[in-house]
Image (spheres, helix red, strand yellow):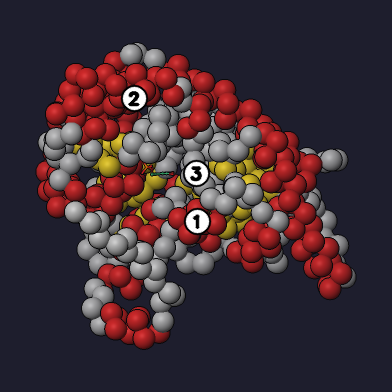
Amino acid sequence: MTEPPEQPHRRRSHTTAHDIERYAGLFAERTHGMRSSAMRDLMAITARPEVISLAGGLPDTSTFPPATFAAQMTKIAQESAAEALQYGPTEGFEETKDCVLQVMGAEGMLPDPEDVIITTGGQQAIDLITKTLVDPGDPVICEAPTYPGAVPVFSSYQADVIQVETDDDGMRVDELESVLRQLAAEGRRPKFIYSVPSFQNPAGVSLSFERRLRLVELARAHEVLIAEDNPYGLLRYEGEQLPPLYQLEGGDYVIYLGTLSKILSPGIRLGWAVAPPPVMEKIVLGKQASDLCTSTLTQYFVREYFSEGHWRDYVESLCDLYRSRRDAMLDALGRHFPPQAKWTRPGGGLFIWATLPDYIDTTDLLAKALRENVAFVPGQAAYVDGRGGSSMRLNFSASTEEQIDEGIRRIGQVIWEQVELYETLTGEHPAPPQRDEKPADNVLPMRKRAEGG
Ligand SMILES: Cc1ncc(COP(=O)(O)O)c(C=O)c1O
């Protein structure tokens, strides 16, 4: 039998205005508010090997021992190949729930397994709760800045997103209180308050204990749900652990979102949500419609991995590695950024948030930085209304200490060029801002550049 001649794959040239017109009338109303996650766009550029990327939120998966991975997958293949290759229940396997309950237990939470659903990453959990709760125009409250990956979710469900300022102690709950009062006066009930209270993405700050208590109190008083997104709670490099909102509140008004992405692997796509039974019922229906179930193979891998009993040792090893990288980045910032810049000093997580003088636009700056083969996430990605234009998110988990130093040096250089240009054009030489250090439990103060360097 002769082989058919090999057909080359069709490569599409760039989309033309005509192409866009051809489909435009078909798009659903909700697509008009859809925005690409800036991080996903950046990922394509930063995949080039010569680029030092401080842009992604990637954990360092090269630290996971390949031999452990191989042994676990081999065991699955030998002992339960047929089951691992099959569909599973929409809610997830009981054994997987046991694993995520161990993770929650490590932060003092003990939910009922019935209240848990296993999801395809934490991102799907955000999507599912928004799909379950939000109609077009419904208010959703979140932090300013907020997780850049949540912004496209909220906009695709046409939520009216209201952002509440954060400072070194996380969300300003006094401002939240005013927002809640204002909405009540307008007869509008926010569908949920989305918060990343521990080592936030992107700012790196944590909500203080007092504010956690007050936030929970406000949620109860106003009968508003909180969506607590906590991928980073266990990646703590110093200070005391703060209780999650779920633990403080008890789970009536808190929907908890978790993921193994940052403490095991984002490639396995395993997250979860914990919600009160009536809400969970709808979330399960929503997941059924989305993808039927989370990968069975992934769940079998997780089960094997947890059965070895060393998952906490691995998290500890990640903490040691990321602590050193955070310190390397803080040190590099002190040496390479101009004195007009300030930045957070996170006690955990993966990110530092830097703010430059307001005449510098970090989206423009990124184009210049990319020419120097270095990338960061411009601050605007973390806002729905164009704010954040002078800020940037810097990731320290995915690069070596040498790459971090070189990457910050290159970004520092393009910032210095902007500062000098501004000073030349305006004749102004603004005094560097004063340091305003103040003690905090687990978050070092939002810090101005150290003197010297
Ligand atoms: C706050 C927050 N929530 C959710 C996610 C999504 O994680 P996953 O990989 O589990 O989908 C991330 C990832 O960076 C995150 O930072």
Considering only vertical position in the picture, is 93 above or below 30? above
Residue 345, percent across and down?
Answer: 62, 38
Task: List the residue tagged with mark 2.
Answer: 103
Residue at (15%, 45%) from the top-left corner?
Answer: 292
Task: List the residue tagged with mark 3.
Answer: 57
Q: Horizontally, is 94 left or right of 453 in the view? A: left
Measure the C-alpha gap from mark 3 to mark 2.
Answer: 20 Å
- Give the image quadrant in which the ligand numbered 1 is located: top left
Marks 1 and 2 close (CB-CB < 8 Å): no
Residue at (23%, 24%) from the top-left corner?
Answer: 77
Q: Horizontally, is 284 left or right of 366 in the view? A: left
Residue at (70%, 36%) from the top-left corner?
Answer: 402
Q: Callout 2: helix, strand or loop? A: helix
Q: Callout 1: helix, strand or loop? A: helix
* Label 2 residue near ligand 1, CB within 8 Å: no
Marks 3 and 2 close (CB-CB < 8 Å): no
Which label is found at residue 44? 1
Q: Which amino acid does label 3 sit on?
A: Gly
The residue carrying pointer 1 sits among few (fewer than 14), some (14 to 19) or many (20 or more) residues within 10 Å by Cα, namely few
Considering only vertical position in the picture, is 382 above or below 315? below
Q: Horizontally, is 66 left or right of 440 in the view? A: left
Quarter occupied by residue 5: bottom left
